[in-house]
């Protein structure tokens, strides 16, 4: 009732909402055009099957705070700033090995500025508030940052030490030609500032302009017979050319400054990755890779929007390119207005439908997929180290006489009894055996998990009763005592009740036994609990994916029937090609208009109807 009272007082205007837990810590931050409608939707339990994260998050919400804004664009800016500041537990967040992304800082608050890599950027900005320090980044690719630092140090003799080691003479860096000796007054402020201006050009990727300036310097020094200085300028040009040759040419247009921003989610809905290709003066100067956290139950559009906002809210205004190519067509007008206002010039954001731009986007997506596979492989290798230990501990804790070689787990998924499905996943020697996965469409829709569990267990084992080689050592039922008892009735009837069968209750991760009222609680950090959770989560993922597929097909077919001009043939085409409402939402107008029998007007009508869903 307390939460209901809070919701009733919320305005119907655009703005940002914050959910706080009992410790008064923000656990989720979002934006909405209509705050009241959006916030109330979180307490609609019909959404919880679609997004299981809500089932965990919503009960933790103890207080709601809203901030009204003038427009959706203002809400977007405020939301991205608050998410970056608070890092809420249930938001989609950019990851950098649990640390903030590093930046390069030119310390203009010092008499003779230095170049520093900085990770705790907010703390650094607080300390230097009011200064003229300039920040370049963020660098999600750490090696790229150090490549830039090394190049700067190779080309320019900047001051390295904050406090001079000697009062009456320059340090060794001066003797090695790596510093101009500003601490001893051996270089003028004007000459030092010229060098800093060139460094800024380098960090911004303006290699062509920098090369032209260095050539002018070299010719000027040579004309004035300052051959040592001319030689240093020549060496800088060569080093710059050598570095520039390592950058891939994307376009012959030397004025092209663009980012390619591609978000890719793995097929198991567990991991998401962003690949950003930065093109400056027609050359690919940097490739940033960002892993995303908290993406399990998020829609792809939401992941894209959150990742885009968080990434570009950290990019300095002068580093925002004129053009950004993306692989999702969602709120692009609002995002473009936001970045255009920050940059003080037009920023074009779009999803290409064909041609060279689409090929570049596909390349970025392929790179992101490779990164995801690499991350999954690393996670798998880490998990394998603990599997044998976990299986032995499970055998002891669950009192299983034989070694555990095969584990099967069942889960039921439905929405208030509709489109009821079930899954059975199989793990052999602690690893998923996807060839042995099974999914079941329950014979009739029913809001009865116990009856559904009995049906699926019977269907899974009645043909395997006389095949002991393909029977599991351990059966896990996703649910508490009721679901376990239902499954055991069928197993007894089939003569398989000798197989150790347990129920796993989600709330406290308690393990229930058929003949024991007191559940087993494993150590929260034990590898055996991690293994059981992994198996249960895989069963849930497999079930919910099938459930969503059936519901999406029903919903899509129903929605398409209401659109004038889209008859049975066009409906079949759309269902075959896109399979869900979300896939059509992600498609561009140009792509839809190019379908057989479609045109721009029909594509616009389709988009409008689908997006209003």
Image (cartoon, rainbow, N blue to C red):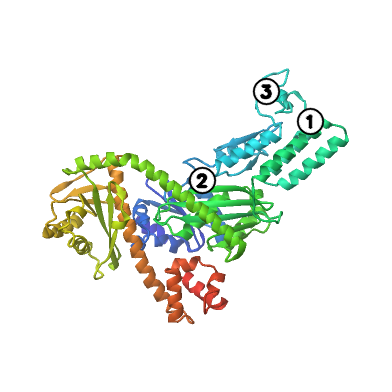
Q: How far apart are marks 2 and 1 (CA)?
A: 41 Å
Q: Distance between the residues labelled 3 and 2?
A: 36 Å
Disc 3 secondary structure class:
loop
Q: How far apart are marks 3 and 1 (CA)?
A: 17 Å
Where residue 384 sits in the image (x, y, percent)?
34, 42
Q: Which one is nearer the viewer's eye here, 32 or 586? A: 586
Is residue 613 something that shows in the picture? no
291 relative to 231 in the view: left or right: left
Tell me, for residue 188, which label it has, or none: 1
Quadrant assignment, res 251 = bottom right
| Residue receiving disc 3 | 164
Compared to residue 478, the image places residue 117 above or below, namely above
Q: Which one is nearer the viewer's eye here, 512 or 345? A: 512
Q: Residues within 10 Å of mark 2 (few under 14, many from 20)?
A: few
Q: Which residue: 48% across, 53% down? A: 369
Which residue of the protein is positioned furthest toward the top in this rendering? 168
Where residue 336 sits in the image (x, y, percent)?
61, 59
């Amino acid at each position: 009732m307390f939460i209901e009272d809070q919701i009733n007082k919320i305005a119907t205007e655009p703005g940002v909402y914050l959910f706080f837990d009992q410790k008064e810590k923000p656990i989720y931050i979002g934006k909405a055009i209509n705050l009241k409608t959006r916030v109330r939707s979180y307490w609609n339990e019909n959404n919880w099957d679609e997004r299981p994260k809500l089932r965990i998050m919503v009960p933790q919400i103890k207080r709601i705070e809203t901030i009204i804004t003038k427009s959706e664009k203002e809400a977007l800016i405020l939301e991205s700033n608050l998410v970056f500041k608070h890092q809420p537990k249930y938001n989609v967040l950019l990851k950098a090995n649990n640390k903030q992304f590093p930046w390069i800082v030119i310390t203009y608050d010092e008499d003779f500025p230095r170049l520093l890599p900085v990770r705790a950027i907010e703390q650094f900005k607080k300390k230097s508030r009011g200064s003229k320090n300039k920040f370049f980044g963020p660098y999600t690719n750490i090696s790229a940052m150090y490549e830039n630092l090394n190049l700067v140090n190779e080309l320019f003799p900047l001051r390295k030490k904050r406090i001079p080691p000697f009062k009456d003479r320059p340090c060794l860096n001066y003797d090695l030609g790596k510093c101009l000796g500003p601490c001893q007054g051996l270089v003028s402020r004007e000459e030092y500032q010229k060098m800093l201006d060139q460094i800024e050009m380098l960090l911004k990727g303006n290699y062509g302009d920098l090369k032209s300036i260095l050539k002018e310097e070299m010719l000027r020094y040579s004309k004035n017979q300052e051959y040592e200085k001319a030689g240093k300028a020549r060496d800088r040009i060569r080093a710059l050319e050598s570095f520039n040759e390592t950058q891939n040419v994307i376009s012959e247009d030397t004025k092209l400054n663009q980012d390619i921003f591609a978000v890719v989610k793995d097929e198991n809905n567990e991991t998401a990755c962003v690949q950003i290709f930065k093109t400056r003066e027609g050359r690919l100067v940097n490739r940033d890779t960002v892993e995303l956290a908290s993406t399990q139950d998020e829609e792809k559009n939401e992941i894209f929007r959150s990742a885009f906002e968080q990434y570009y809210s950290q990019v300095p205004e002068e580093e925002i390119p004129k053009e950004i190519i993306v692989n999702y067509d969602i709120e692009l007008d609002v995002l473009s207005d936001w970045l255009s206002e920050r940059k003080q010039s037009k920023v074009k954001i779009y999803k290409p439908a064909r041609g060279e731009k689409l090929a570049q986007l596909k390349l970025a997506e392929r790179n992101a997929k490779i990164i995801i596979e690499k991350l999954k492989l690393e996670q798998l290798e880490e998990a394998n180290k603990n599997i044998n230990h976990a299986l032995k501990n499970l055998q002891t804790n669950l009192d299983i006489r034989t070694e555990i070689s095969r584990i099967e787990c069942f889960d039921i998924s439905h929405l208030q009894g509709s489109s009821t499905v079930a899954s059975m996943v199989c793990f052999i020697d602690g690893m998923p055996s996807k060839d042995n996965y099974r999914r079941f469409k329950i014979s009739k829709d029913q809001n009865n998990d116990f009856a559904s569990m009995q049906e699926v267990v019977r269907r899974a084992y009645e043909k395997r009763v006389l095949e002991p080689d393909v029977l599991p050592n351990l059966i896990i039922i996703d649910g508490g005592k009721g679901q376990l008892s239902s499954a055991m009735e069928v197993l007894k009837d089939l003569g398989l009740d000798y197989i150790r069968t347990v129920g796993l209750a989600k709330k406290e991760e308690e393990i229930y036994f058929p003949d024991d009222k007191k559940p087993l609680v494993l150590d929260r950090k034990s590898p055996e609990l991690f293994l059981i959770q992994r198996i249960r989560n895989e069963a849930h993922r497999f079930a919910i994916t099938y459930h969503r597929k059936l519901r999406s097909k029903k919903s899509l077919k129903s929605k398409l029937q209401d659109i004038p001009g889209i008859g049975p043939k066009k409906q079949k085409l759309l269902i075959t090609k896109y399979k869900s409402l979300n896939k059509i939402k992600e498609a561009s107008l140009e792509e839809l208009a190019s379908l057989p029998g479609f045109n721009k007007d029909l594509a616009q009508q389709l988009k409008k109807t689908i997006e209003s869903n």
